Amino acid sequence: MSQLITPDLVLLDADLGTDRAGVIRALTNLVAEQGRATAAESLFDDAWAREQLTDTGVPGGIAIPHCRSEAVTEATLVMARLAPAVDFGAADAPADLIFLIAAPAGADQEHLTVLSALARSLVNPEFVDSLRAAATREEIVALVEQATAPEEKAAPAAAGAGAAAATASEAPSQDANSDAAARPVLIAVTACPTGIAHTYMAADSLAAAAERAGVELHVETQGSSGSTPLDPAVIAAASAVIFAVDVDVRDKARFAGKAVVQSPVKRGIDAPDTMIAEALAAASDPNATRVAGGGAASETTSSTSDEHFGQTVKRALLTGVSYMIPFVAGGGLLIALGFLLGGYLITETAGSIIVENSLWNLPEGGIAAYLGAAAFQIGAASMGFLVPALAGYIAYAIADRPGIAPGFTAGAVAGLMGAGFLGGIVGGLLAGVAAHWLAQRKTAAWFRGLMPVVVIPLLASIFASGLMVLILGGPIASLTVALNDFLNGLNGASAIVLGLILGAMMGFDLGGPVNKVAYSFAVAGLGAGAIDNQGPWMIMAAVMASGMVAPLAMALASTVLARRLFSPVEKENGKAAWLLGASFISEGAIPFAAADPLRVIPASAIGSAVTGAIIMAFGVTSQAPHGGVFVFFAINPFPMFLVAIVAGTIVTALIVVALKRFVRKSDAVAPAAAQVPVAA
C-alpha cells in the first residue's frame, strides 16, 4: 500500500488565510502538485461540496475536511498546522490542526480502514498534543503512521459493531462482574455521507462518554471501511439506541421498539456526554420516542429534541408527495395521451367505449378512439389514487406501516367528501398522528401482535375518517372549491404574479425545501385540473418550465457563452446539464450553485421567475408533472412552453456571466487564493 502522508504533504505553522475555503483550496492544490490528483479544481469542488453538507470542525481545534473524488489517483492525507487558526464550524474554537483526507472514488478497503483509524485517533488528546508539539514534518509523518499502523492501534471500544465501550479486565473479579452487570446497556449507530471520518470519530467520542458515565455501550459504525452488524442479543439487552447519523440507518427494523435519540453525526463528536445522558433518560421514559416497528426496514421518528413539530409535518408532506407522484405522473401522461388520440370529448364516451368495444369491434373513430379511451380510463383510474396515496404516505411518514391503512382510508373519504388534496393532507396527518399515538401505548405481550395489523388500523381509521365525515370534510370541501375557483379565474396580472413567485421558488434552491414546496403545491393540485378548470395545469407548466431553467442556463453559460469563466469540471458538468435541464432535473445546476452560490442562485431565481411569468401570461398548460420536453404531447401550446424556457435560460445565463465578469468573488472561493506557503 502506498504511503498516505509524506513530509511534502505537511505544512507547519502555515498562514493559509482566515477562510476555510481558502484553506481547503490550498491543501487540494498541494495534493495535485504532489501528483496525487489529476485536477486541483475538481478535488476542491468535491471537498467543498462535502463541507457544505456538514461542518468538518470538531472540538479541540481540529478540522477534517474530506471527500472521495474521481480526481484523486492515490489515497492521500495532508496535514496543516495553522497560524492563525481558521473557523471550520466547531462549537468551541477555530481549528489550527487541519487534516485533508482525499480518497479516490474507488478507494480500496485497506486505505479506507487506515484513513478511518486516523480519524479515530484525533479524539485522543495525547495524540493531538503530540501533533501540536512536533517540531518537524518528519515527526508529524511518524506520529500519523504510528497512529494508523494496525499493530499499534489500541482496539477502541467502538471499533466495530458490538465492541463494548467499557470492558472488564481479562480476568475480572466477582465484584467487577457484578458492577458490569449493573451497568446500563446502550447501543449506537454512527454514519456520515462519506463514511470516512465523522462516522468513526462519533463512535469513539460516544464510547469515551459512555465510559465516563459508567455505561456499557456497543456501537455499529456504518462507514466506508466496513460495517459489522450488532449482535441481536446485544440489541435485545440494550435499553435505548443512539443514532448519530446524517444518512439512513441500514436495516433499521432491528431496533424496533427501542427508545431512540437521534442527531446528526457531528453532534456525536461535539456533545457525546449529552447524547449519552439523553439516551439514559429516554430508556427510563415510557413516553420517549421509539424506533418504529412493523417488521421491515422502517423510518425512525427523530427525537423530539431534534425535530420539532413543523419539521415533522414538512417531512411527512414531502414523503406523501414523493409517493404520490408516480400515480400522478403515469395518470397524467395517460390522460394526455387519451386526449391526443381521442380528442377532448373522449371524457364523455371513454367508459362506454372500453366496455362495449374491443380491438375486434372498434367504435366510431376507429383504433385511435379506442386506444384513446383506454388510455384516458387507465389514466383516470391512476389519478383516482392521488388523494388516498397522498394521505396514506403522509400517515406512513409519521407512524410507519401501521399508518398506511388509516391514511389511505382517510384519503378516500376526503375524495368522497369533495375535500380534494387539502382533505387528503389533513386526513393523512390525522391518521398518522392517531396511529403513532396508538403505537406508543404499552400493551400485554399476547396482545402486542394484534396492534399493527388490527387495532391501530381500526381505531386510527375511525378517528381520522370519522373526523373527516362528521366535522372537517364539509369545510375543507368548501375551501377546495374556493381554491379551484380562484385558480380557474386567474388571468392577467394575478396569474403573472403567481408565475413569478412559483418560478423564483423553483430556481432558488434547486431541489431543496423551497423548490419542493412549489413543486408539491403544483403536483398536489394537478388532479383538480380539467378542460373547464385549467388553472392547476397552468401552475404545473409554470413550475416544470421554471425548474428546467437553472441547469439549462448553466449549460449555456459554461459550454457556449463564457467557457473561460468556468473550471474544467464545471464545463463537464455543463455538458451533462443540457440533458438534465431538458428532462426537468433541477439538481443539474447544484454543482455550479455549490461552487458559486452568491452568483448562481440569484441569477437562477430571476431567470426562473421570468419563465414562470411567461407561462402564466400565455396560459400554457401541462398535464404531466415531470419529464420536461419529453412529455411534449401533454403540454399545450408546446411552442410557447419552449419560448418561456429559452427566455428564462438566456436571462439566467447572461446574469451569471455578467456577475462572474464584473463582480469580484470573495476570497473564500477565489481560485487565486490558493498559494501554498513554504512549510516552516
Image (cartoon, rainbow, N blue to C red):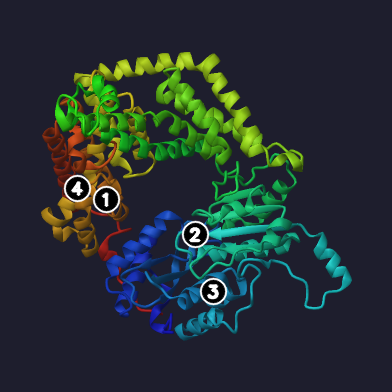
Q: Quadrant of the N terminus?
A: bottom left
Q: Nearer the viewer, residue 11 or 487?
A: 487
Q: Nearer the viewer, mark 3 or mark 4?
A: 4
Residue at 55% over, 51% down: 297
Rendered image: mark on residue 552: 4
How far apart marks 1 and 2 lie (CA) works out to 24 Å
Identify the amino acid type marked 1.
Ala
Location of mark 2 (residue): 192
Does the CB distance between marks 1 and 2 fall below 8 Å? no
Q: CA distance from mark 4 to mark 2?
A: 32 Å
What residue is disc 3 on? 117
Pick whichever, 58 or 94, lies toward us: 58
Residue at horizontal 24 percent and vertical 18 percent from the top: 532
Q: Earlier in the sequence, mark 4 or mark 1?
A: 4
Amino acid type, callout 3: Ala
Q: Are marks 4 and 2 in contact (CB under 8 Å)?
A: no
* Marks 3,4: beta carbons within 8 A: no
Residue 589: image tag: 1
Residue at the front extreme of this rendering: 360
Q: Position of residue 160 (x, y in %)?
A: 60, 69
Which badge, 1 or 3, comes first in the chain's sequence?
3
Displayed quadrant of residue 178: bottom right
Is 306 drawn above or below residue 155 in the view shown? above
Q: Secondary structure at mark 3?
A: helix
